[in-house]
Image (cartoon, grey):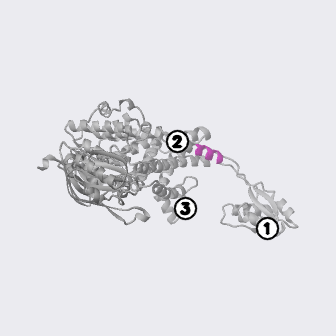
Amino acid sequence: MNLRIVRAIAAVTLREFWRSPDAVFWTYGFPLLMAVVLGYAFHGQAPEPLPVAVVDGPAAEALAERLRGSERLRVEVLPAEAADRALARGRVALLLRGDAAAPVLRNDPSRPDAELARLLAERELRPPAERAPPIAVEVEDRPGSRYIDWLIPGLIGLNLLGAGMWGIGFNLVHLRTQRLLRRLIVTPMRPREFLLGFLLGRGILVVPEATVIALFGVLLWGVPFRGSVLAFALLVLVGGFAFMGLGCLLAARPRTIEAIAGLTNLCQLPMWLLGGVFFSNERFDGWLAGLVEAVPLTHVNRALRDVMLEPAGVADVLLPLGLLAAFGGLCFALAVRWFRWT
Amino acid sequence: MTGGDLAIELRGLRKTWRGAGWRGGGKVTVAVDGLDLDVRRGEVFGLLGPNGAGKTTTVEICEGLTVPDGGSVTVLGRRWGGGDDQALRQRLGVCLQESKFHEKATVRETLRLFASFYPGGRAIDEVLALVSLQEKADARQSALSGGQRQRLAVATALLGRPELLFLDEPTTGLDPQSRRQLWDVVRGFRRDGGTVVLTTHYMDEAQQLCDRVAIVDHGKVIALGTPVELIRSLGAEHCIDVDVEPGALGARVTAADLQALPGVQQCECDGARASLTVASVHRALPAMLELLAARGVPLRGLATRHATLEDVFVRLTGRHLRDEGAQ
């Protein structure tokens, strides 16, 4: 391995990136924008009331009035046909007809809000004597336990994934279609020197990228940072390396941009769904739980949350670090072996 | 000749390509069809032929970029895949057909990258001077003209002080001045003892630059020699091109009539133009004018010139080098 060559490849790769304003925006600007928008969207608001419909009829207004007793329900009275359509389209979570004494409730329990709406409606329709004694409710809004606290580490993981898959995979295939790789491989440069240099040139960017998102979270929404900064840096580097190795592997053979885009999406979609970015993946069971553990993004996100939300140090994340490094190394070795230059 | 005098030795080289995509799937094209070739050290060797003749495939096999299906390849006394390809690559300079570099990198940055591959290579400023790109040293790739890009490609090939330089269609699409500049670079490289293999479909380029030329068609060498030898093989060193009114050729005067004139070796008729290869212009020309006048065919144009490698190619294949049909 000639380090002079690795350094030269890394330098030209990094420069190529910095000199493309659009690439800089989509790498830095867009993820930040997403973090800001999502942060505001999920930042400690009271939940929206659930829409329910009451079918128009003689007792409809009385029934609607009873339901309006709950501030968590938004009640509207609709003609039968309109009410059916509203339920079918998911505009309302629940449909009621009849009178308050013996109403008929209609919902599709497989929709996320349907059961909650049913419970709320049932509670409002009970006679006052049967109601449960008042329970004091505390809203969890302490830093470290809110959704935004949970989301920010996930967004960092998501960015590492994107940087590896698109930043590496897509650009390698682009260089192949540009016939630049052919020119490079007829020099004394070795394949592994090129791939490592390319990885470093793009990989160096993940550190500032992750840092900026973390800083935004900490400064803007008070997301805590309780663990070790060193552990965070290591996770970003090693996690980034794992996804970049995967990017190299996906880019090893394709000859067209369409092929690499398809392969990248194929790999990315399960990770988005199972990697625990936007919703928790800790409650799956059966084979799905196995799949969750097989997805590298799961381990990146879990460890990042340990480091940011809990006082985890380097020793606490050694296992994920080891797993991710091994995964990245394996992908990289296979990519060097299978890489197509022409 | 011993193997030590040869820069390249090809024996029975074969390469077929299988078409890609839905429609080309499974369609087999024979690119190189049992080709033998020797390139001597210190010469400029030209592979001349139409597009699709197999020139680029042959050169890319020599460069170690393409693996042949059959035959043997020896480059500077070594074979590809022998375990030390990197050492062999140190001794080669390569300029691929339409090679691209990083779009946002300047000329100097591109050369710096390639310099890192060749320890003990030339200094960047020295190479810039060799290809006259000093003034463009800080211009980005995207700001260069076609000729400047091509000279940059040659510069990357010269950085490592190669013993053997491959130039694949180095002047295609260039203006006359850029072509001449590149020719000077090639001549300078040869003067310093280097060996050059170049492919071209410009006969004047081959004639001007090459010590020896192999004419390639359908993946085979169909003629080999110095440009002078090849032209002399026509048996005639001059050509007469005559333009007449359309329809006159073949009707009032036939190719056979022209070929029968004194001193005429060969006649090619193409619509309203006839090209005669002649041993002695002073005998053939008056006879031809007399014949045309006698048959009542008025002249529209007349030119005499020295025969070229193009005429050799036409004689051998019945086609022109730049025929579209040859693609």
Viewport quadrant of the C terminus of chain B: bottom left
Residue B168 in view in this figure: yes
Q: Nearer the viewer, residue B200 or A330?
A: B200
Residue extending farthest to the right is A58
Mark closer to the observer (1, 2): 2
Decide: few, some or many residues near mark 3? Use Cα within 10 Å; few <14, some 14-19, many ≥20: few
Which is nearer the N-term, disc 2 or disc 3? 2
The span shown in magenta is A33-43
Q: Secondary structure at mark 1?
A: helix
Residue B53 in view in this figure: no
**Which of the labelled discs sits on residue A81, or is there none?**
1
Residue A266, horizontal then vertical, whole percent:
49, 59
Residue at x 56%, y 60% (from the top left corner): A283
Q: Nearer the viewer, residue A294 or B60?
A: B60
Residue B57, horizontal then vertical, whole percent:
30, 54
Q: Are marks 1 and 3 in contact (CB under 8 Å)?
A: no
Q: Nearer the viewer, residue A69 or B201?
A: B201
